[in-house]
Image (cartoon, rainbow, N blue to C red):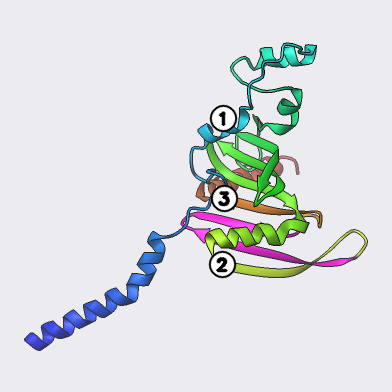
Amino acid sequence: MKRKIVKSLLKFIAVVLFLSPALMNAQEAPRLEFKGLAPDEDVSDIVKKMQIATPTQSENLSDTEKELRSMFPDEKWTDLDDLLAKRMHCVPNETMGSDTRCVNNEETIAGVRASLTIYLKNNYALNIRILFSSVNFSIVVGALEEKYGKPDSEAINTVRNAIGETFQNITKTWKSGNSTMTAEKYPSTIVNSAITIEGKMYREAAKEDTEKRIKEGAKDL
């Protein structure tokens, strides 16, 4: 009887030791995010902070600036350039299953200049996309690997530009929970690279949007 108990106990210990690394990795799964912005989370407070610029004491305002200030009386911003270029703009959107699209063309990632676009639905981030010069792809990816470790998958394929030149496109993907982050060197052109972070809400919203468009498209046949 004692031998059976000991044998069962040893089996239990072996199973625990076998599963413990997987359990530890699951607990330590990194949160895929960009400057606090993460998919499937309410990011309204972060977006509001990104929209607000430094207040100004200038009294010499142009008619255009006065009009814009009257349109946004509760916001603080420095001048017309801040409003038009250096701030994040949020506008209604009906693509990718979202209801709002926010853009900041004066963002940075890993110390290089970038453009940030966030697709939102009811203030929750569905899709976070960062564009930057493909020249800096190795720098940005190196920083991502420093923070998140080696990607879960990597793919290389050949792309061709308009004049027939070929380039090696690199795609690296990190996964954590329901979130996925993809770094692609040449997503559409050889000029820009892209980082995309998305979660379960985006996949569900995109599926609903596709089904809706298919039904509407069927009416135009």
Q: Is residue 122 visible?
A: no
Q: What range is drawn magenta here? A: 165-187
Numbered badge on residue 150 = 2
The residue where tag 3 is placed is 198
Farthest residue to the front: give it: 57
Tell me the distance, in whole angstroms, between the alpha carbons under discs 1 and 2.
Answer: 33 Å
How many labels, in total?
3
The x and y percentages for residue 140 are 66, 57
The residue where tag 1 is placed is 48
Q: Name above or below for residue 134 compared with residue 1.
A: above
In terms of sequence position, does the residue under pointer 1 or pointer 2 come before the other?
Answer: 1
Tell me the distance, in whole angstroms, between the alpha carbons under discs 3 and 1.
Answer: 20 Å
- In the picture, which quadrant includes the C terminus? top right
Q: Main secondary structure of the magenta part?
A: strand
Could you tell me the amino acid type at mark 2? Answer: Lys
Farthest residue to the left: give it: 1
Q: In the image, what residue occupies the spot 58% across and 62% down?
A: 145
Q: Are marks 3 and 1 in contact (CB under 8 Å)?
A: no
Q: Is residue 1 left or right of residue 61?
A: left
